[in-house]
Image: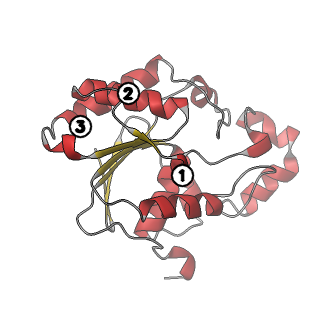
Protein backbone atom coordinates (compact mmCIF):
# COMPACT_ATOMS: atom_id res chain seq x y z
CA UNK A 1 0.00 0.00 0.00
CA UNK A 2 1.41 3.41 -0.91
CA UNK A 3 1.68 6.22 1.63
CA UNK A 4 -1.17 7.99 -0.18
CA UNK A 5 -3.47 5.04 0.52
CA UNK A 6 -2.84 4.67 4.26
CA UNK A 7 -5.36 5.51 6.96
CA UNK A 8 -4.24 8.74 8.61
CA UNK A 9 -6.61 8.84 11.59
CA UNK A 10 -8.52 6.35 13.72
CA UNK A 11 -11.74 6.64 15.66
CA UNK A 12 -11.33 5.81 19.32
CA UNK A 13 -12.13 2.13 20.06
CA UNK A 14 -15.87 1.50 20.24
CA UNK A 15 -16.86 4.86 18.74
CA UNK A 16 -19.61 4.77 16.11
CA UNK A 17 -20.13 7.66 13.70
CA UNK A 18 -23.31 8.02 11.65
CA UNK A 19 -22.35 10.43 8.90
CA UNK A 20 -25.21 11.98 6.93
CA UNK A 21 -24.89 14.09 3.84
CA UNK A 22 -27.41 16.95 3.83
CA UNK A 23 -30.54 16.49 1.72
CA UNK A 24 -30.86 17.63 -1.87
CA UNK A 25 -30.82 21.31 -2.84
CA UNK A 26 -31.79 22.91 -6.13
CA UNK A 27 -28.10 23.49 -6.81
CA UNK A 28 -27.42 19.76 -6.37
CA UNK A 29 -30.14 19.04 -8.89
CA UNK A 30 -28.66 21.53 -11.35
CA UNK A 31 -25.07 20.22 -10.85
CA UNK A 32 -24.04 23.69 -9.70
CA UNK A 33 -20.99 23.96 -7.44
CA UNK A 34 -22.15 24.86 -3.90
CA UNK A 35 -19.07 24.59 -1.73
CA UNK A 36 -19.64 26.91 1.21
CA UNK A 37 -22.49 28.87 -0.36
CA UNK A 38 -25.45 28.74 2.02
CA UNK A 39 -28.14 27.03 -0.06
CA UNK A 40 -31.36 25.65 1.51
CA UNK A 41 -32.87 22.20 1.03
CA UNK A 42 -35.55 21.63 -1.57
CA UNK A 43 -38.66 19.46 -1.05
CA UNK A 44 -36.81 16.26 -1.99
CA UNK A 45 -34.03 17.11 0.46
CA UNK A 46 -36.49 17.63 3.28
CA UNK A 47 -38.05 14.21 2.64
CA UNK A 48 -34.60 12.60 2.56
CA UNK A 49 -33.84 14.13 5.94
CA UNK A 50 -37.07 12.84 7.47
CA UNK A 51 -36.28 9.38 6.09
CA UNK A 52 -32.92 9.44 7.86
CA UNK A 53 -34.70 10.22 11.11
CA UNK A 54 -37.09 7.32 10.67
CA UNK A 55 -34.15 4.94 10.11
CA UNK A 56 -32.28 6.19 13.17
CA UNK A 57 -35.44 5.99 15.27
CA UNK A 58 -35.12 2.20 15.30
CA UNK A 59 -32.05 2.60 17.52
CA UNK A 60 -33.98 4.34 20.29
CA UNK A 61 -33.47 4.77 23.20
CA UNK A 62 -29.70 4.26 22.87
CA UNK A 63 -29.42 6.99 20.26
CA UNK A 64 -30.46 9.66 22.75
CA UNK A 65 -26.97 9.36 24.26
CA UNK A 66 -25.25 10.17 20.94
CA UNK A 67 -23.60 13.52 20.30
CA UNK A 68 -25.46 15.33 17.49
CA UNK A 69 -23.29 17.63 15.38
CA UNK A 70 -23.90 19.60 12.18
CA UNK A 71 -21.95 21.71 9.73
CA UNK A 72 -22.66 25.45 10.11
CA UNK A 73 -24.20 25.64 6.62
CA UNK A 74 -27.98 25.94 6.61
CA UNK A 75 -28.61 22.87 4.43
CA UNK A 76 -26.86 20.72 7.04
CA UNK A 77 -28.58 22.38 9.99
CA UNK A 78 -31.98 22.06 8.32
CA UNK A 79 -31.32 18.39 7.64
CA UNK A 80 -30.34 17.83 11.27
CA UNK A 81 -33.46 19.53 12.58
CA UNK A 82 -35.65 17.33 10.38
CA UNK A 83 -33.71 14.21 11.39
CA UNK A 84 -34.10 14.94 15.08
CA UNK A 85 -37.74 15.86 14.66
CA UNK A 86 -38.48 12.56 12.94
CA UNK A 87 -36.72 10.69 15.75
CA UNK A 88 -38.88 12.56 18.28
CA UNK A 89 -36.11 14.70 19.75
CA UNK A 90 -35.82 18.47 20.20
CA UNK A 91 -34.96 19.69 16.67
CA UNK A 92 -32.47 22.22 18.02
CA UNK A 93 -30.58 19.87 20.35
CA UNK A 94 -27.31 19.69 18.42
CA UNK A 95 -23.89 21.35 18.21
CA UNK A 96 -22.25 23.18 15.31
CA UNK A 97 -18.82 22.01 14.12
CA UNK A 98 -17.15 24.44 11.69
CA UNK A 99 -14.55 21.77 10.87
CA UNK A 100 -17.14 19.74 8.92
CA UNK A 101 -18.30 22.54 6.63
CA UNK A 102 -18.09 21.62 2.96
CA UNK A 103 -14.99 21.96 0.81
CA UNK A 104 -14.63 25.53 -0.39
CA UNK A 105 -14.67 25.71 -4.19
CA UNK A 106 -13.60 29.34 -4.20
CA UNK A 107 -14.36 31.10 -7.48
CA UNK A 108 -16.15 28.03 -8.84
CA UNK A 109 -18.98 28.37 -6.33
CA UNK A 110 -22.27 29.15 -8.08
CA UNK A 111 -21.02 27.85 -11.44
CA UNK A 112 -22.72 25.08 -13.41
CA UNK A 113 -20.40 22.12 -13.91
CA UNK A 114 -21.42 21.88 -17.56
CA UNK A 115 -20.28 25.47 -18.26
CA UNK A 116 -16.88 25.36 -16.58
CA UNK A 117 -14.95 23.79 -19.50
CA UNK A 118 -15.64 26.98 -21.47
CA UNK A 119 -15.40 29.42 -18.57
CA UNK A 120 -12.28 28.00 -16.93
CA UNK A 121 -10.55 25.39 -19.13
CA UNK A 122 -7.29 25.77 -17.19
CA UNK A 123 -8.99 25.05 -13.88
CA UNK A 124 -10.88 22.08 -15.30
CA UNK A 125 -7.62 20.68 -16.68
CA UNK A 126 -5.90 21.16 -13.32
CA UNK A 127 -8.69 19.38 -11.49
CA UNK A 128 -8.62 16.50 -13.98
CA UNK A 129 -4.86 16.06 -13.63
CA UNK A 130 -4.88 16.00 -9.81
CA UNK A 131 -8.41 15.71 -8.38
CA UNK A 132 -7.18 15.27 -4.80
CA UNK A 133 -4.49 17.94 -4.71
CA UNK A 134 -5.92 20.60 -7.05
CA UNK A 135 -7.00 23.79 -5.30
CA UNK A 136 -9.35 26.29 -6.95
CA UNK A 137 -8.50 29.96 -6.61
CA UNK A 138 -9.64 31.15 -3.15
CA UNK A 139 -10.72 27.59 -2.31
CA UNK A 140 -9.54 24.30 -0.85
CA UNK A 141 -8.24 21.02 -2.23
CA UNK A 142 -9.46 17.63 -1.06
CA UNK A 143 -6.10 17.34 0.67
CA UNK A 144 -6.81 20.57 2.60
CA UNK A 145 -10.26 19.29 3.52
CA UNK A 146 -8.92 15.95 4.73
CA UNK A 147 -6.55 17.70 7.12
CA UNK A 148 -9.42 19.76 8.53
CA UNK A 149 -11.81 16.81 8.88
CA UNK A 150 -9.16 14.44 10.26
CA UNK A 151 -8.55 16.84 13.11
CA UNK A 152 -12.26 16.72 13.94
CA UNK A 153 -12.46 12.91 13.70
CA UNK A 154 -9.61 12.57 16.17
CA UNK A 155 -11.56 14.57 18.78
CA UNK A 156 -14.66 12.35 18.82
CA UNK A 157 -15.06 10.87 22.29
CA UNK A 158 -18.58 9.43 22.07
CA UNK A 159 -20.94 7.91 19.52
CA UNK A 160 -21.89 10.69 17.11
CA UNK A 161 -24.49 11.57 14.48
CA UNK A 162 -23.09 14.23 12.16
CA UNK A 163 -24.81 15.99 9.27
CA UNK A 164 -22.29 17.30 6.81
CA UNK A 165 -21.46 17.28 3.09
CA UNK A 166 -20.32 15.14 0.20
CA UNK A 167 -16.70 16.24 0.29
CA UNK A 168 -16.51 15.66 4.03
CA UNK A 169 -17.92 12.15 3.64
CA UNK A 170 -15.32 11.34 0.99
CA UNK A 171 -12.27 12.53 2.91
CA UNK A 172 -13.49 10.98 6.18
CA UNK A 173 -13.57 7.60 4.46
CA UNK A 174 -10.19 8.19 2.88
CA UNK A 175 -8.65 9.07 6.24
CA UNK A 176 -10.31 6.31 8.27
CA UNK A 177 -10.31 3.45 5.76
CA UNK A 178 -7.05 4.09 3.94
CA UNK A 179 -8.67 4.54 0.53
CA UNK A 180 -6.30 5.58 -2.25
CA UNK A 181 -6.50 9.37 -2.37
CA UNK A 182 -6.74 9.39 -6.16
CA UNK A 183 -10.10 7.62 -5.71
CA UNK A 184 -11.42 9.74 -2.83
CA UNK A 185 -12.88 12.62 -4.95
CA UNK A 186 -15.00 10.10 -6.86
CA UNK A 187 -16.51 8.15 -3.94
CA UNK A 188 -20.28 7.92 -3.96
CA UNK A 189 -22.08 10.37 -1.67
CA UNK A 190 -25.80 9.52 -1.78
CA UNK A 191 -28.15 11.94 -0.10
CA UNK A 192 -30.69 9.24 0.73
CA UNK A 193 -28.38 6.93 2.73
CA UNK A 194 -26.66 7.07 6.13
CA UNK A 195 -23.01 6.06 6.36
CA UNK A 196 -22.08 4.18 9.56
CA UNK A 197 -18.34 4.39 10.29
CA UNK A 198 -16.30 2.70 12.98
CA UNK A 199 -12.59 2.09 13.09
CA UNK A 200 -11.69 0.64 9.66
CA UNK A 201 -15.28 -0.30 8.80
CA UNK A 202 -18.19 1.25 6.92
CA UNK A 203 -21.82 0.32 6.28
CA UNK A 204 -24.62 2.08 4.41
CA UNK A 205 -28.07 2.29 6.02
Question: Residue at position x 73%, y 57% from top?
Answer: 128
Q: In this view, does 136 lie to the left or right of 99?
A: right
Disc number placed over residue 81 in the picture, else none: 2
The quadrant in which the C terminus is found is top left
Q: Which of marks 2 and 3 is in front?
A: 2
As helix, strand or loop, the secondary structure at mark 2 comes to helix
Q: In this view, does 61 lie to the left or right of 200?
A: left
Which residue is outermost to the top? 43
- Residue matched to label 3: 56
User: Residue 189, position in %: x, y?
Assistant: 47, 45
Q: Which of marks 3 and 1 is in front?
A: 1
User: Residue 192, position in %: x, y?
Assistant: 38, 34
- Residue matched to label 1: 99
Q: Quadrant of residue 32?
A: top right
Q: State which tag comes first along the sequence, 1 or 2.
A: 2
User: Residue 103, position in %: x, y?
Assistant: 62, 48
Question: Residue at position x 71%, y 63% from top?
Answer: 130
Q: In which quarter of the image is residue 177?
A: bottom left
Residue 59, compared with residue 90, is above or below; it is below
Alpha carbon of mark 1 to alpha carbon of mark 2: how far? 19 Å
User: Residue 4, position in %: x, y?
Assistant: 57, 76
Please say whether residue 146 is visible from this viewpoint. yes
As helix, strand or loop, the secondary structure at mark 3 comes to helix
Q: In this view, does 158 lie to the left or right of 187?
A: left
Amino acid sequence: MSNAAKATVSLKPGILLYLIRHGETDWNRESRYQGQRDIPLNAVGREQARRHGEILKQFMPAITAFDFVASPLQRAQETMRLVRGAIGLDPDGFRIAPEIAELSYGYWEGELAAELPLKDPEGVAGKASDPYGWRPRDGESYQDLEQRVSGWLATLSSDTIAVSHGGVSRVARGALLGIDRSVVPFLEVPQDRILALSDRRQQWL
